[in-house]
Image (cartoon, rainbow, N blue to C red):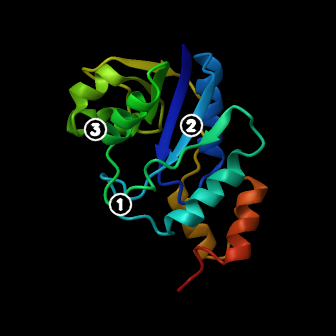
């Protein structure tokens, strides 16, 4: 049976923190692959700043150097809010021979009681919690903890820096930075 890690998010834009988390979890849990799943519209935050086609392309470029990282567009293929339950229901149905590990930050661990169909989800996936500054990995649910280097990079900060015409070098992969510049994404409007 294959073991796959799922890292979902808006990836608006994808940054080195996402890649470090994915690789650290992959290695620590000896997973075969990590699937990056960009969301169409996340249920817990505002709509993405940049449309799904650009975010998908940035993820593709961000993960291209790691053969263990794959892009899965299941959520951007649907319209409306992206609920993990719906995604995992489809993925487990389509892949009965895969054991899924769903990677979440400590901020989401605290929010788990509010997730759509959380008890059903617990039967479909193993939740993997990674530390995030200002949050604890406390939960009444079973969570596998993986220690990752605390990297203070956020998509919000990257957007702010781009809006202020400040460098994002070493915060995102070069291929992502080049794409952002080429398509003039996140510029003041």
Chain-order first, disc 3 or disc 1 = 1
Which residue is denoted by mark 2 in the rendering?
35
Is residue 152 visible to us here?
yes
Q: Which residue is rendered at x = 48% and y = 31% of the image? A: 131
**Quadrant that contains the N terminus:** top right
Q: Nearer the viewer, residue 162 or 23?
A: 23
Chain-order first, disc 1 or disc 2 = 2
| Rendered view: 96 above or below 178 | above
Q: What secondary structure is marked by label 2?
A: strand
Horizontally, is 90 left or right of 145 in the view? left
How would you rate the neighbour count of disc 1 (Cα within 10 Å): few for under 14, some for 14-19, many for 20 or more? few
Which residue is denoted by mark 1 in the rendering?
79
Q: Which residue is rendered at x = 35% and y = 51% of the image? A: 82
| Rendered view: 119 above or below 170 | above
As drawn, the label of residue 111 is 3
Q: Which residue is rendered at x = 74% and y = 34% of the image? A: 67
From mark 3 to mark 1, how far is it between C-alphas? 24 Å
How would you rate the neighbour count of disc 3 (Cα within 10 Å): few for under 14, some for 14-19, many for 20 or more? few
Chain-order first, disc 2 or disc 3 = 2
Image location (x, y in percent) of residue 91: 42, 34
How would you rate the neighbour count of disc 2 (Cα within 10 Å): few for under 14, some for 14-19, many for 20 or more? many
Q: Residue furthest top?
A: 1
Q: Which residue is rendered at x = 59% and y = 32% of the image? A: 34
Image location (x, y in percent) of residue 118: 24, 31
From mark 1 to mark 2, how far is it between C-alphas? 20 Å
Task: Tell me if label 3 and label 1 are in contact, CB under 8 Å.
Answer: no
Horizontally, is 24 left or right of 8 in the view? right
Figure label count: 3
């Amino acid at each position: 049976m294959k073991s796959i890690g799922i890292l979902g998010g808006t990836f608006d834009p994808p940054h080195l923190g996402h890649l470090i988390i994915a690789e650290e979890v992959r290695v620590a849990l000896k997973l075969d692959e990590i699937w990056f799943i960009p969301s169409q519209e996340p249920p817990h935050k505002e709509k993405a700043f940049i449309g799904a086609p650009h975010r998908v392309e940035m993820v593709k470029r961000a993960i291209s150097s790691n053969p263990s990282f794959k892009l899965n567009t299941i959520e951007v293929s649907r319209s409306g809010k992206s609920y993990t339950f719906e995604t995992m229901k489809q993925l487990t149905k389509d892949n009965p021979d895969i054991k899924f590990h769903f990677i979440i930050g400590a901020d989401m661990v605290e929010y788990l009681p509010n997730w759509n169909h959380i008890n059903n989800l617990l039967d479909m996936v193993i939740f993997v919690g990674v530390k995030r500054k200002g949050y604890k990995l406390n939960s009444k649910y079973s969570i596998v903890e993986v220690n990752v280097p605390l990297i203070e990079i956020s998509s919000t900060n990257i957007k702010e820096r781009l809006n202020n015409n400040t460098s994002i070098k070493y915060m995102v992969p070069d291929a992502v930075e080049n794409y952002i510049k080429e398509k003039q994404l996140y510029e003041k409007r």
